[in-house]
Image (tube, rainbow, N blue to C red):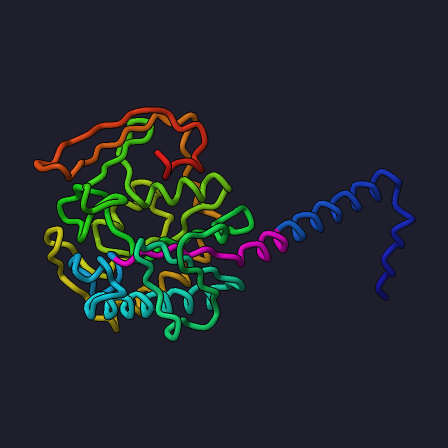
Amino acid sequence: MHAEPAPMNSFPLQSRLRHWRLVLTVALIVLGHATLSAAEKKIYIVTDLEGASGVYKFTQTRNCQETALGRQAMEYLMGDIAAVVRGLREGGATEIIVSDGHGGQAFVPHLMAPGAKYITGLPRSGGGIDGSYVGLVQLGCHAMMGTPDGVLNHTQSSKTENRYWYNGVESGELAQSAAIAGHYGVPTIMVTGDEATCREARQFFGDNCVTVAVKRGLSREAAVLYPFAETRQALYKGAKRAMSVIRKCKPYKLTEPIKAKKQYLILTPAPPKLMIKEGEITNVLDLYRF
């Protein structure tokens, strides 16, 4: 015959206390994982146009809404966004906000993929990233000004050829966007663009950040383009994988006050004049005002 297990109250008080402490600890761990898992659902995507599939010359990106080449490039971008949204959704994202980060605005409303909400138009009084998001995706991006193999490389302005240094480190738009997100504790989990952009992303955000290259630069306006069927599949797979690396990615933060330096050209009157501005930024949220 099998002996019946002794009731819990038959054990010494100390043993019962240890038992319930263990049960409580396990419950808290499970609850913590469940809460974190639920939180890792809200993703913010900021887009640009220069790093989209098929884009390799400035005539595609300047005044894009007013030219045939520009409108076509906008459609290319929307296809990239659709692939990333689908991948994020299948990776577990339950809320996705896509922000139009191209200066001339580059969204095509009738091509918006389901599964996300889209922010476009200027000026804006809201809709930016905040602490409710757990991951930032930088999509369709380009390398910083002066990158030899960076397709359409620039930082903020391709015409005045701006360059920026923060705390002695030259930084492009990838670092700028990531620093704003980092202020809220949000890590960059994925970057897409050309090979040079992906290299720059790994340099600033580490190897855990998922990078997807959709082309390889030969010069500022020349590239080896990859077929759309291949880039869109890679973007989908990369986005799905990005959802699994959120815990491994760290927010990118700049130590404040930020020692800032800006180099740029004054184009008029001719000839162009190289200017340098130096100073401190006390709050990273004022980064773009410098």
Q: Quick check: 29 above or below 225?
A: above
Residue 172 visible in the snapshot: yes
Q: Which residues are magenta?
A: 33-49
Q: Is residue 77 above or below residue 194?
A: below
Give the quadrant of the N terminus: bottom right
Q: Is residue 236 magenta?
A: no
Left or right of 122? Residue 71 is left
Image position of 172 with respect to 96: above or below: above
Residue 235 in the image, given as x and y percentages of width and height: 33, 64
Please state the horizontal and vertical placement of residue 239, each as a whole percent of the image. Answer: 39, 61
Instruction: Identify the residue at the far right of this view.
Output: 10
Q: Residue at x 41, y 51 (%)?
A: 189
Q: Nearer the viewer, residue 25 or 185?
A: 185
Residue 236, visible in the rendered structure = no
Residue nearer the viewer, 254 or 62: 62
Q: Is residue 40 rendered magenta in the image?
A: yes
Q: Which residue is outermost to the bottom?
A: 110
Q: Residue 47, percent across and down?
A: 35, 57
* Residue placed most toward the observer, 260 or 148: 260
Residue extending furthest toward the left: 271
Identify the residue at horizontal 22%, vertical 32% (top origin): 263
Total of numbered circles in the picture?
0
Rendered residue at 63%/55% (across/down): 34
